[in-house]
Image: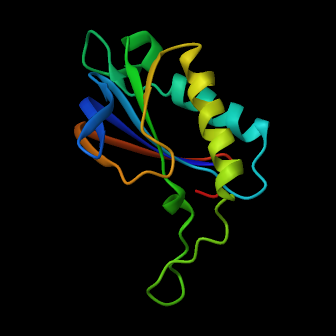
């Protein structure tokens, strides 16, 4: 399971002109589910997302977690995180989980994160427009199998 985590001052997801999720301070999390991902992968990533200390404390040091900072998550499904473009110019997505498996993990991730912070979502398999203001900028790449 992979995630691109961006610290934002605000973000929103729009599908066919309708806002499906919107947050202020927090994280936009682009989530990709890979073939063979398990509940352990989900728990690892959820723990990292909640615990990443990338919000500034009272003295301006990145020292606070999402939860400590009172932030929210806008969770977006993004199978293209498993795109492999090492050969040729057209990415291969064979390592991405099948849609029905990916959707289950995406919904479980939303539920898991919502136990600790406010969560908004996009729409699985929809064409989404994501608008965000990356604060910092701060962008962290996470992989449950520690590929990077």
Q: Is residue 145 visible?
A: no
Horizontal side, residue 35 vs residue 1: left or right: right
Please name the residue shown 25% across and 19% down the image: 60
**Residue 123 lies in what quarter of the image?**
top left
Q: Where residue 116 sits in the image (x, y, percent)?
A: 55, 13
User: Number of marks in the image?
Assistant: 0
Check the picture and name the quadrant holding the C terminus. Answer: bottom right
Q: What colouring does the structure picture have?
A: rainbow
Residue 140 against residue 36 in the figure, above or below: above
Q: Where residue 41 sits in the image (x, y, percent)?
A: 72, 41
Horizontal side, residue 44 vs residue 137: left or right: right
Please name the residue shown 61% across and 34% down the image: 107
Q: From this viewpoint, which residue is outermost toward the bottom?
A: 88
Q: Where residue 17 sits in the image (x, y, percent)?
A: 23, 42
Residue 111 against residue 116 in the figure, above or below: below
Q: Where residue 125 sits in the image (x, y, percent)?
A: 50, 52
**Residue 27 lies in what quarter of the image?**
top left
Please name the residue shown 31% across and 21% down the image: 61
Horizontal side, residue 105 vs residue 38: left or right: left
Given residues 114 and 44, the one toward you in this image is 114
Residue 41 against residue 99 in the figure, above or below: above
Horizontal side, residue 66 vs residue 99: left or right: left
Q: Is residue 129 visible?
A: yes
């Amino acid at each position: 399971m992979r995630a691109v985590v961006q610290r934002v001052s605000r973000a929103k997801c729009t599908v066919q002109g309708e806002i499906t999720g919107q947050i202020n301070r927090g994280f936009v999390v682009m989530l990709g589910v890979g073939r063979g991902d398990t509940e352990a992968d989900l728990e690892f990533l959820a723990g990292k997302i909640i615990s990443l200390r990338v919000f500034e404390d009272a003295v301006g040091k990145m020292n606070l977690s999402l939860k400590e900072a009172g932030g929210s998550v806008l969770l977006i499904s993004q199978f293209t995180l498993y795109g492999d473009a090492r050969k040729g110019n057209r990415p291969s997505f064979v390592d991405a989980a099948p849609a029905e498996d990916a959707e289950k993990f995406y919904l479980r991730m939303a539920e898991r994160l919502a136990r600790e912070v406010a969560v908004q979502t996009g729409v699985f398999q929809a064409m989404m427009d994501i608008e965000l203001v990356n604060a910092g900028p701060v962008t962290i790449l996470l992989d449950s199998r520690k590929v990077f």
